[in-house]
Amino acid sequence: MTKRLISLWNDENGFIVSAELILVSTILVIGMVVGLQTIRETVTTEMADVAAAIGSLNQSYNFGGMTGASSSIAGSSFVDYTDFCDATAQNTAGGQQCVGIVLTSTPEGTAS
């Protein structure tokens, strides 16, 4: 039993491979965090653009009445009034139409 413990204690096979694996995986994780943050900001910005485009759609319609020899049909209309968030002015957060996008950055080494 002691002979096996001594051989395990003196065994250094695989040490370099483990250290390299930890180093490479750490670099990959740090790169993924930065990449995923960039993707998150890009998707949020694009979704704000889509929301602004949908909010800008005018759903009003109108058709006039018709009168024939022995019948008539009345016209109809619908007006799409502006909603609370349909204003085109930008809010203080930098986004449009009730979508606020706040991007903060802190210099490296300072607490956020």
Image (spheres, grey):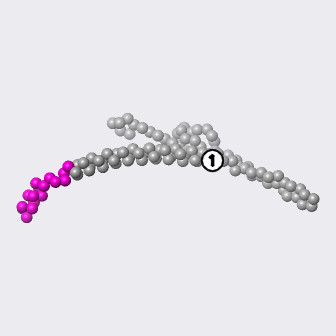
Q: Within 10 Å of the Cα at label 1, are there few (<14), some (14-19), or many (20+) other Cα atoms?
A: some
Residue 91 on image: x %, y %: 57, 39
Q: Is residue 87 left or right of residue 18?
A: right
Q: Residue furthest top?
A: 107
Res 70 → quadrant: bottom right
Q: Nearer the viewer, residue 80 or 51?
A: 51
Quarter of the picture holding the C terminus: top left
> In the rendering, at what x and y percent does residue 42 appear?
49, 44
Magenta stretch contains residue 85: no
Give the residues in magenta.
1-16
Q: Nearer the viewer, residue 60 or 82?
A: 60
Picture residue at 58% right of the left edge, 41% below the top: 96
Say above or below: 18 vs 106: below
Residue drawn 10% across the image and 54% down it: 10
In the rendered structure, the answer to whether residue 62 lies left or right of residue 58 reads: right
Can residue 7 be seen by looking at this rendering? Answer: yes
Where does label 1 land, which residue? 55
Q: Nearer the viewer, residue 64 or 25?
A: 25
